[in-house]
């Protein structure tokens, strides 16, 4: 404030006074102007600072969603800006109490942070005013008219002046019409305390506090929204997770359902295909008719059984009529369509070609998916053949029952003791054996055997049974009363359809009478044969004797009647040699006949002794070589490791001399004659090989008949008994003879004798 001073020169007072007044006026004006400008400037600065603060806090609110951080900054900045001693944010709880939740404080004043303010220091009536946006300024706690309790309360924290602005929030709730209602409520307070001195709060300070409270309110809202959003987000996330899990579960069960459905479809298809295949492959005719009796299925077996093809009958009335009355007057078709099932109905129907066929029907109603009868399915078997077979069987049975031959049917096994069991015997069996069916069923046919039953024949049966072969034998059997009877029976194995033998059938006949007849006939025949053989033998023998006898007789007569022949020494000797040769031949002939005769009568002497066969043969060949002359080359070879063997030396001599003399005799042009002896482990093999005339094939079969000679022998002398003698001698040693011969090439005769240890 400028104080006007007295003028020092009064004479010039008027002008000067005017000038002075003018100057004073100007001065004053300038002073005022400067002060105004200072004030404006200060106000501008404060306003700028205020705006900066508001802007900074607003900025922070925008940048941070952390409410604590916003509130902490707010109280700090307000304290700094207002130079207050304490700035706090007071949170009002629903029960009317409250608490300082943020504070900035200058020392040495005590903190109020965390203190709970009782309800009476902040009564309910204030809430209303604050909710409506009222502020409160207290310049001096001591002087102002404030509640005592509040004054006391704030004084304990050193408060002298305070500025309180509300922080207001809004309730937002949706009503039943889905409109959103909102009303303000008091969230808390922004409070500035001055403790050092009373303070007159300026209007802009109040405005600043209000603006900042509004920013804090926004921050609170923003933070709450953020928290709600976070909550919603997490709820949403939870719901998404839950929904995802539900979807995954639903998906899995859907997949399982799809898989199951696919499986069911496959199974269904498989069942359909199986059914189709069954219908197609069934050996029984399968027909399916609809409600009107029209054919829907007619399988290949039906085509074959009745002659109509599927194409001919499909969607037409069935040619195999099912609508004809049965015994109970109902028709098969009608009854099945009313729900009846037939398992076995015998019918006779005509085929396409008019011939009859005996059938067995099984028929059942066909149900649709609703369980309603929609048609008939019939399975038909052709039993024509079966019927014929049954008839044939009946006939056969009557044959078996009525025949005069005994018929026995047994099980197939066991072949060994106790033998197969009897399953059936006919009446003839009882007549022949005296046993009734009750007495033999379950027993073995061996009950008919006895001491005189030929064991060899039984062995024959056994062998045949073991090989499942038919066999016919004739043996002595015994009746129930013990009487013997000759039983000729044929055993035949019976196989089932698979070829497995299941039974034996024996047809037996009492051949006792026919025995006897056969035996007599056979012995007569044998006698006749022997007598024929003897006659033939003697006629041939006498014929063979006649030749040397005639020769000897002729020579004797010549010598007797002709002096010349007798006195001519050469001629006499020649005739005498003829007589000697003839006699020798006859002796040889007689020897052979005797040997054969003895052998056939079983009287041929046989004295086997250990013989060193190799040495014996070698010696034999040497002797033979001397008498054979130079025409023939005789060799002997021995193979294998020699061992002593039991042989009859006399018979061996007969064998070797016959074989070697034949080889020499039937090789008139000469040649190589080989005697080979081979010691095999269990057999001795003796063979004589020549390069002579050979034996024609047709003669080879008959060489061991007495007096039989090859047709190619021409003038070569012989009686045809040598090989018969050889055979008899070999047989005495249980040996065998084998001939290989080719006409013009040569002959090999081999003898095999088993080594008996
Ligand atoms: P014999 O009683 O004097 O021996 P055979 O030689 O005629 O008279 P076998 O020895 O029994 O009688 O022989 C019978 C027949 O077999 C002979 O007549 C001859 O046809 C034929 N035969 C036997 N051995 C030979 C052989 N090595 N080569 C050709 N033919 C043979
Ligand atoms: Mg001979």
Image (cartoon, rainbow, N blue to C red):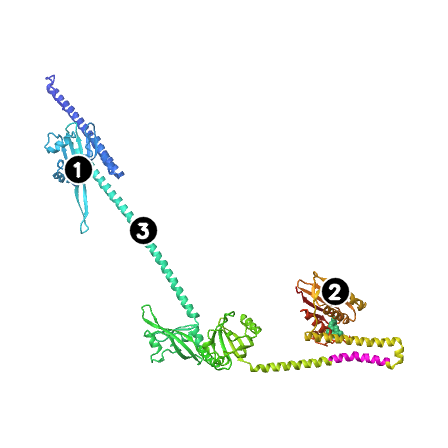
Q: Position of residue 355 (x, y in %)?
A: 44, 81
Q: Position of residue 14 (x, y in %)?
A: 10, 20
Give the residue displayed 75% in from the left and 76% down from the top.
590
CA distance for labels 1 and 3: 45 Å
Give the residue displayed 33% in from the left and 56% down from the top.
253
Question: Residue 456 is drawn in which quadrant?
Answer: bottom right
Look at the image and tell me in which quarter the N terminus lies. top left
Can you identify the residue that label 3 sits on?
A: 245
Can you identify the residue that label 1 sits on?
A: 98
- State which mark lies toward you, 1 or 2: 2
Q: Earlier in the sequence, mark 1 or mark 3?
A: 1
Residue 558 is one of the magenta-drawn residues: yes
Majority SS type along the magenta span: helix
First to last magenta residue range: 540-559
Cβ of mark 1 under 8 A from ligand 1: no
Question: Residue 721 is drawn in which quadrant?
Answer: bottom right
Q: Position of residue 501 (x, y in %)?
A: 50, 71
Can you identify the residue that label 2 sits on?
A: 616
Residue in front for this viewpoint, 387 or 572 = 572
Q: Pointer 1: residues within 10 angstroms few (<14), some, or many (20+)? A: many
CA distance for labels 1 and 2: 153 Å
Residue in front for this viewpoint, 639 or 56 = 639
Q: Earlier in the sequence, mark 2 or mark 3?
A: 3
Q: Earlier in the sequence, mark 1 or mark 2?
A: 1
- Asked if marks 1 and 2 touch (Cβ < 8 Å), the reply is no
Cβ of mark 3 under 8 A from ligand 1: no
């Amino acid at each position: 404030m400028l104080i006007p001073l007295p003028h020092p020169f009064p004479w010039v007072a008027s002008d000067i006074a005017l000038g002075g007044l003018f100057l004073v006026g100007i001065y004053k004006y300038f002073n005022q102007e400067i002060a105004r400008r200072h004030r404006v400037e200060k106000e501008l600065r404060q306003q700028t600072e205020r705006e900066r603060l508001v802007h900074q806090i607003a900025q922070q609110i925008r940048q941070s969603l952390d409410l604590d951080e916003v509130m902490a900054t707010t109280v700090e900045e307000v304290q700094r800006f207002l130079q207050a001693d304490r700035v706090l944010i007071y949170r009002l709880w629903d029960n009317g109490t409250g608490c300082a939740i943020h504070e900035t404080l200058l020392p040495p004043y005590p903190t109020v942070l965390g203190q709970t303010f009782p309800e009476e220091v902040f009564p309910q009536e204030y809430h209303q005013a604050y909710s409506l946006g009222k502020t409160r300024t207290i310049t001096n706690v001591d002087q102002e008219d404030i509640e005592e309790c509040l004054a006391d309360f704030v004084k304990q924290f050193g408060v002298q002046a305070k500025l309180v602005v509300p922080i207001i929030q809004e309730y937002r709730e949706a009503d039943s019409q889905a409109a959103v209602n909102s009303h303000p409520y008091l969230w808390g307070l922004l409070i500035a305390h001055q403790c050092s001195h009373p303070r007159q709060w300026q209007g802009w300070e109040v405005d600043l506090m209000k603006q900042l409270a509004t920013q804090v309110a926004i921050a609170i809202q923003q933070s709450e929204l953020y928290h709600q959003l976070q909550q919603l987000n997490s709820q949403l996330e939870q719901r998404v997770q839950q929904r995802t899990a539900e979807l995954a579960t639903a998906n899995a069960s859907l997949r399982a359902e799809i898989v199951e459905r696919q499986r069911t479809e496959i199974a269904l298809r498989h069942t359909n295909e199986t059914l189709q295949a069954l219908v197609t492959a069934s050996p029984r005719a399968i027909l399916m008719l609809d409600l009107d009796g029209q054919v829907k299925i007619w399988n290949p077996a039906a085509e074959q059984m009745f002659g109509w093809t599927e194409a001919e009958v499909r969607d037409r009335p069935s040619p195999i009529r099912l609508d004809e009355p049965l015994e109970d007057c109902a028709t098969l078709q009608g009854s099945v369509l009313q729900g009846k099932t037939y398992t076995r109905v015998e019918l006779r129907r005509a085929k396409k070609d008019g011939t009859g066929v005996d059938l067995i029907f099984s028929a059942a109603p066909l149900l649709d998916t609703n369980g309603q009868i929609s048609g008939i399915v019939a399975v038909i078997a052709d039993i024509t053949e079966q019927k014929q077979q049954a008839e044939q069987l009946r006939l056969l049975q009557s044959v078996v029952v009525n025949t005069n031959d005994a018929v026995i049917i047994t099980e197939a096994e066991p072949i060994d003791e106790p033998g197969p069991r009897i399953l059936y015997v006919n009446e003839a069996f009882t007549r022949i054996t005296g046993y009734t069916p009750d007495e033999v069923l379950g027993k073995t046919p061996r009950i008919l055997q006895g001491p005189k039953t030929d064991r060899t024949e039984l062995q024959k049966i056994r062998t045949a049974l073991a090989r499942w072969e038919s066999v016919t034998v004739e043996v002595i059997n015994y009746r129930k009363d013990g009487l013997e009877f000759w039983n000729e029976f044929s055993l035949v194995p019976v196989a089932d359809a698979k070829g497995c033998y299941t039974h034996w059938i024996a047809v037996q006949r009492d051949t006792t009478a026919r025995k006897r007849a056969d035996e007599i006939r056979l012995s007569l025949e044998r006698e006749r044969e022997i007598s024929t053989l003897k006659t033939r033998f003697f006629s041939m023998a006498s014929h063979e004797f006649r030749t040397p006898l005639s020769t000897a007789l002729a020579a004797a007569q010549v010598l007797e009647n002709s002096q010349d022949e007798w006195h001519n020494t050469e001629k006499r000797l020649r005739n005498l040699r003829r007589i000697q040769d003839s006699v020798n031949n006859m002796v040889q002939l007689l020897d052979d006949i005797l040997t054969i005769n003895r052998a056939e009568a079983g009287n041929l002497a046989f004295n086997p002794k250990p013989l060193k066969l190799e040495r014996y043969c070698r010696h034999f060949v040497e002797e033979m070589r001397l008498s054979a002359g130079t025409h023939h080359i005789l060799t002997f070879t021995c193979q294998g490791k020699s061992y002593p063997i039991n042989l009859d030396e006399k018979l061996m001599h007969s064998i070797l001399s016959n074989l070697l003399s034949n080889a020499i005799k039937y090789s008139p042009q000469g040649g190589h004659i080989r005697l080979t002896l081979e010691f095999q482990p269990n057999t001795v093999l003796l063979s004589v090989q020549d390069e002579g005339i050979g034996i024609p094939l047709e003669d080879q079969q008959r060489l061991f008949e007495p007096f039989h000679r090859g047709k190619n022998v021409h003038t070569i002398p012989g009686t045809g008994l040598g090989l018969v003698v050889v055979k008899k001698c070999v047989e005495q040693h249980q040996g065998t003879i084998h001939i290989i011969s080719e006409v013009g090439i040569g002959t090999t005769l081999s003898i095999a004798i088993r080594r008996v240890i």
